[in-house]
Image (cartoon, helix red, strand yellow):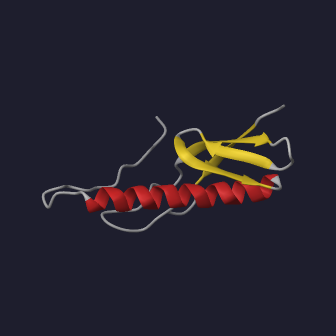
Amino acid sequence: MSVSKATLVSRRPLAKGGAGQYPRGMKLTAVFEPAKEGGYTCFVEEVPAAISQGETLDEAKANLRDALKLVLECQRELAEKDLSPNALREPLEFAEA
């Protein structure tokens, strides 16, 4: 069984809110495995909670992007909920060295 890897690149912010937006151009690794029953299961290596599936590779990619957006939005909401009034929030940019 072969595994297909792809790099998901955000060309636009994934979520809005707070002190900034998710960095543009951030690269993550998506893994697509053919499922026994057909279609693909997939996940993002760097974000274990971002998992999905699809009948075709294109559908799996679209579903995985949606799953990643939801995971990041949910995590942001959970983090904001528990912030102290003195917390400092600022964007963190990922740039290649």
Up/down of 96 relative to 88, above or below:
above
In this view, the residue in front, 39 or 15, is 39
In this view, the residue in front, 55 or 31, is 55
- Please identify the residue farthest to the bottom as the structure is shown: 17
The x, y position of residue 35, in whole percent, is: 81, 43
Up/down of 20 relative to 40, above or below:
below
Give the residue drawn at x 51%, y 62%: 14
- Please identify the residue farthest to the front as the structure is shown: 37
Count of residue discs:
0
Please identify the quarter of the rendering in which residue 21 is found: bottom left
Up/down of 35 relative to 56, above or below:
above
Taking the image as shown, residue 27 lies to the left or right of residue 41, namely: left
Taking the image as shown, residue 56 lies to the left or right of residue 10, namely: right
In this view, the residue in front, 96 or 86, is 86
The x, y position of residue 58, in whole percent, is: 78, 57
Give the residue drawn at x 31%, y 56%: 79
The x, y position of residue 10, in whole percent, is: 57, 56
Give the residue drawn at x 49%, y 39%: 96
- Please identify the residue farthest to the left as the structure is shown: 86
Give the residue drawn at x 52%, y 48%: 26
Taking the image as shown, residue 22 lies to the left or right of residue 25, namely: left
The x, y position of residue 57, in whole percent, is: 80, 52
Query: On the rendered image, what quadrant is the N terminus found in?
Result: top right
In this view, the residue in front, 57 or 7, is 57
Please identify the quarter of the rendering in which residue 20 is found: bottom left
